[in-house]
Image (cartoon, rainbow, N blue to C red):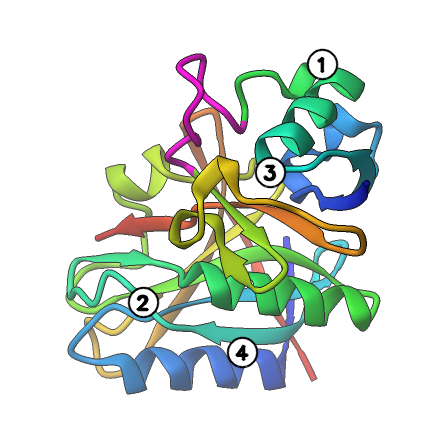
Amino acid sequence: MPVDVRIPTMLRAHTGGAATVTVEGATVRDVLEQLVAAHPALAGQIVTPEGGLHRFVNVYLNDDDIRYLDKLDTKVGEGDTVSILPAVAGGS
Amino acid sequence: MLRISAGAHAEMVAHCWSGLPLEACGLLAGTGDDATRCYPTRNVAESAVVYTVDPKGFLLADRDAEASGLTILGVFHSHTHTAAYPSPTDVAQAPDPGWHYVLVSLADQAPAVRSYRIVEGNITEEPVVLVQ
């Protein structure tokens, strides 16, 4: 089913400038795989080669961090929005 | 150059003061190089030496900015006892080469606000212009 994926500004160079990409999928993992299939330059930017979520990226399903749901196996439904956000951190 | 509205600037500095003794952080939104809105966020690291922008706060800020026709164009955080210059940690973890990285130093009585571009580990300071 179609799901909107929000792309952070730092990755929009890889989506032709698109802020939102609509792809099909039943889980967050499906959705991210379809996103990379549509925009191959995103490969390795969100999911690691080992199949886990990249530590410098947060992924939300609607209002919830998928790390506190079923991670990449979290189910998605029509009308859901998956948001990819860079982890923003630093220190003095 | 970063142009920042007086309102966003005041809110940013106030958020940094109110975060003491911990580091405070937040996001700036606007268009181009004009920051017109400040989104204070929680420092989920709850530390005096490091910060992590609350991801949920980032999500809500991004959503609100987009609804207003704005984009997130930078991040700010305070240095409570050191100068307003990016630390090695700041540089290593800078996520977006297009962003403005704003430092608010509270080391002296008057807060010092400086802005930087961080591209592939290279730090370049840029002028900060206050817009009324």
Question: Which residue type carries mark 1?
Answer: Pro
Q: Residue B69: percent from the left, percent from the top?
A: 84, 66
Say if the magenta span includes residue B1.
no
Per the model, the C-alpha gap separating discs 4 and 1 is 39 Å
Q: What chain is tagged by disc 4?
A: B
Prevailing secondary structure of the magenta residues: loop
Q: Amino acid at mark 2?
A: Asn
Cα distance between the residues tagged 1 and 2:
34 Å
Q: Say which mark, if any, is on residue B43.
A: 2
A90 left or right of B29 in image: left
**Of labels 2 and 4, the one closer to you:** 2
- Residue B113: where, in percent of width, then height? 42, 67
Q: Are marks 3 and 4 in contact (CB under 8 Å)?
A: no
Name the residue carrying label 3.
A28
Could you tell me residue B118's position as x and y percent?
A: 47, 37
Which label number is shown at residue B5? Answer: none
Q: Residue B128 or A86: which is nearer the viewer?
A: A86
Mark 4 or mark 2, which is nearer the start of the sequence?
4
Question: In the image shown, does A28 or A13 lie closer to the viewer?
Answer: A28
Q: Nearer the viewer, mark 2 or mark 3?
A: 3
**Which residue is depicted at the point 44% across and 42% down?**
A71
Q: Are marks 3 and 1 on the same chain?
A: yes
Mark 2, other Cα within 10 Å: few <14 / some 14–19 / many ≥20:
many
Q: Which residue is mark 1?
A: A40
Marks 3 and 1, how far apart at CA: 17 Å
Number of residues whose C-alpha sits closer than 10 Å to that of mark 4, classed few (under 14), some (14–19) or many (20 or more): many
Distance CA(mark 3)–CA(mark 4): 38 Å
Range covered by the magenta-colored residues: A46-56
Q: Position of residue B130 (x, y in %)?
A: 61, 74
Image height check: is B10 above or below A16?
A: below
In front: mark 4 or mark 1? 1
